[in-house]
Amino acid sequence: MEVDGKVWEIGTEEALYIGKGAQALSFSSSDAQRPAKFYFNSAPAHGRFPDKKIGKEEAVRTTLGDLATSNRRTINKYLVPGAANLPAHHRPDPTRGRPSVEHHALSHP
C-alpha cells in the first residue's frame, strides 16, 4: 500500500491505520500471479493522528462460542482500543445523545 508517497508492506493478517488528511492511497501486490486481497473500511475522524501498521501480535484477541455447538472461534481485532496502543476518545454523539468512540493510532500512556 502507498499512502501519500510512503510505501507500507502489509502482510497477511495485518492492518494499516491511515490517519485523517491522507490525500493519495494506492494498492498493489508484490506477486501478480497471486494478487493480494484488501479489505477497506472508512470512518469519519475528528483528529489527525499518524499512520500506523498493526500486526496480528498487536491485535486484541477475543475467543467466542462453544465447542459443543461447533461455534468456537477467535477474532483478532486490529483497530480497537488496546490494539497496538490505539487510544479511544469518547465524546458525545450529537445525533444520538450518547457517547461515541473514535479510535486513533497513537501511542497512549
Image: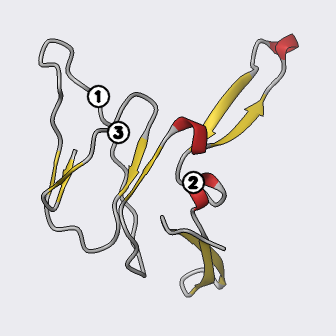
Q: CA distance from mark 2 to mark 1?
A: 23 Å
Q: Quarter-wise, where is residue 58 in the image?
A: top right
- Residue 39 image label: 3
Instruction: Please state which of residues 2 and 76 is positioned toward the viewer in this rendering.
Output: 2
Quarter placement of the C terminus: bottom right
Report the residue marked by disc 2.
84
Q: Is residue 33 left or right of residue 85?
A: left
Instruction: Please state which of residues 104 and 65 is positioned toward the viewer in this rendering.
Output: 104
User: Closer to the observer: label 3 or label 2?
Assistant: 2
User: Closer to the observer: label 2 or label 1?
Assistant: 2
Q: Quarter-wise, where is residue 15 in the image?
A: top left
Looking at the image, residue 59 lies above or below residue 103: above
Report the residue marked by disc 1.
37
- Please tell me how crowded label 2 is: few (under 14), some (14-19), or many (20+) other residues with Cα within 10 Å: many
Q: Position of residue 5 (x, y in %)?
A: 12, 58
**Secondary structure at numbered mark 1:** loop
Amino acid under disc 3: Tyr
**Secondary structure at numbered mark 3:** loop
Q: CA distance from mark 1 to mark 3?
A: 7 Å
| Residue plotted at (30% across, 35% down) | 38
Q: Is residue 23 left or right of residue 64?
A: left
